[in-house]
């Protein structure tokens, strides 16, 4: 079996398996880890070959992208593709996000997709990490520059900021990723305040799939006061702005307030994931993949960033 970064993450053995490819291929199996656009094949509405994802991811792909030809897999069930056995596991990043455990007559391989070892409010749980020989792990925040503050504390600060802003006569506008972060914020505001939540059409489209799993209350329009949640702010008189993202730990957003709320694990979380899986070798992908591999090697862990050259397993 061999692996490389090409059309997504390519694993070749008795079958060709593509994980989060840019486009699907005839005669291959495509596994989608989650519904963020950088992990979804561009031809997902009319795919070639067989395409699989978790059931919740399939539902988001349908409600948000209009993709109805993706096959659903159940978490913790094993699927056999010509002797290559694939088990989807909860990844904790956004609803439906999946890690794939791949077993064949060689080393056990775990691909994380995007993960969160702490989970969040609108996911199935924290990343369900299991032992594997080869760990292919995301490295979005794979540098010691990215160590996040306590996330529950950030959640409380965000809600307090929104409530105080309304009390002062402003409309709080929170910019957050359309899929995942927006729903977490809607959930949080619903649970802790009586403030109406107004969202963009995009957030409403993504949120529809969440309603099968979580009670979310939001509207496309409402009289003031309300809190606005969307990837972009909209024009309104007397508004105050905020951004909810892990990047807020390093970035300044001008007159908008940054809240370091992340769907990803931070550097320490990624390290915890590596320790838990306890692999013989770590292969890093996405974001700070080179830096994270370097940090792991400093700790005596065999690690390299995945490139377009095949690694033989
Ligand atoms: Zn993601």
Image (tube, helix red, strand yellow):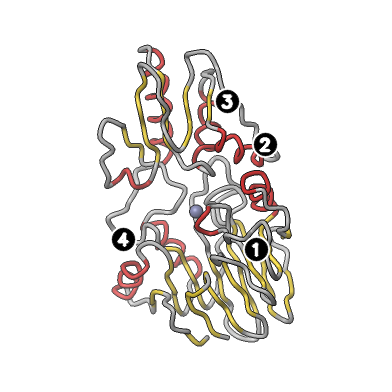
Residue at left offset 47%, top offset 14%: 225
Q: Which residue is drawn at 31% across and 32% down?
A: 257
Tags 4 and 2 touching, CB below 8 Å: no
Q: Nearer the viewer, mark 2 or mark 1?
A: 2
Q: Position of residue 300 (x, y in %)?
A: 33, 77
Which mark is first along the chain, 3 or 1? 1
| Mark 3 or 2, closer to the camera | 3
Q: Name the residue under label 1.
A: 88
Q: Are marks 3 and 2 in contact (CB under 8 Å)?
A: no
Q: Name the residue under label 4.
A: 143
How many angstroms separate mark 2 from mark 1 (CA)?
22 Å
Please tell me which residue lies in front, 177 or 185: 177
Q: Mark 3 points at which residue?
A: 220
Image quadrant occupied by the N terminus: bottom right
Give the Cα distance between marks 3 and 2. Answer: 16 Å
The answer to the question of whether label 1 and label 3 lie on touching residues, with beta carbons closer than 8 A, is no
Task: Say whether residue 28 is visible.
Answer: yes
Q: Position of residue 45 (x, y in %)?
A: 67, 56
Q: Identify the secondary structure beneath mark 1.
A: strand
First-in-chain label (4 vs 2): 4
- CA gap, disc 3 to disc 4? 39 Å
Element assignment for label 3: loop
């Amino acid at each position: 079996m061999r692996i490389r970064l090409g059309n997504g993450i390519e694993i070749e053995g008795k079958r060709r398996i593509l994980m989060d490819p840019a486009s699907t291929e005839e005669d291959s199996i495509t596994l989608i880890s989650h519904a963020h656009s950088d992990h979804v094949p561009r031809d997902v509405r009319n795919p070639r070959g067989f395409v699989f994802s978790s059931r919740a991811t399939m539902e988001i792909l349908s409600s948000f992208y209009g993709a109805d030809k993706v096959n659903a897999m159940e978490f913790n069930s094993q699927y056999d593709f010509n002797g290559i056995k694939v088990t989807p596991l909860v990844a904790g990043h956004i609803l439906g996000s999946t890690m794939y455990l791949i077993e064949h007559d060689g080393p056990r391989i775990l691909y994380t997709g995007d993960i969160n070892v702490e989970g969040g409010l609108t996911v199935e749980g924290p990343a369900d990490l299991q032992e594997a020989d080869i760990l292919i792990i995301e490295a979005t925040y794979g540098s010691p520059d990215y160590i996040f503050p306590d996330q529950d504390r950030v959640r409380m600060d965000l809600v307090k900021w929104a409530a105080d802003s309304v009390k002062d006569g402003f409309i709080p506008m929170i910019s957050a990723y359309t899929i995942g972060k927006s729903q977490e914020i809607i959930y949080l505001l619903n649970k802790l305040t009586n403030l109406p939540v107004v969202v963009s059409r995009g957030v409403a489209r993504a949120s529809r799939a969440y309603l099968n799993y979580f009670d979310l209350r939001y509207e496309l329009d409402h009289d003031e006061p309300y809190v606005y949640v969307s990837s972009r702010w909209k024009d309104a008189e007397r508004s105050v702005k905020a951004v909810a993202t892990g990047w807020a730990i390093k970035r300044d957003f001008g007159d908008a307030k940054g809240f370091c709320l992340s769907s990803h694990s931070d550097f320490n979380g990624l390290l915890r994931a590596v320790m838990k899986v306890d692999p013989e070798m770590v292969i890093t992908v996405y974001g700070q993949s080179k830096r994270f591999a370097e940090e792991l090697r400093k700790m005596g862990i065999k690690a390299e960033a995945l490139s377009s050259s095949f690694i033989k397993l």
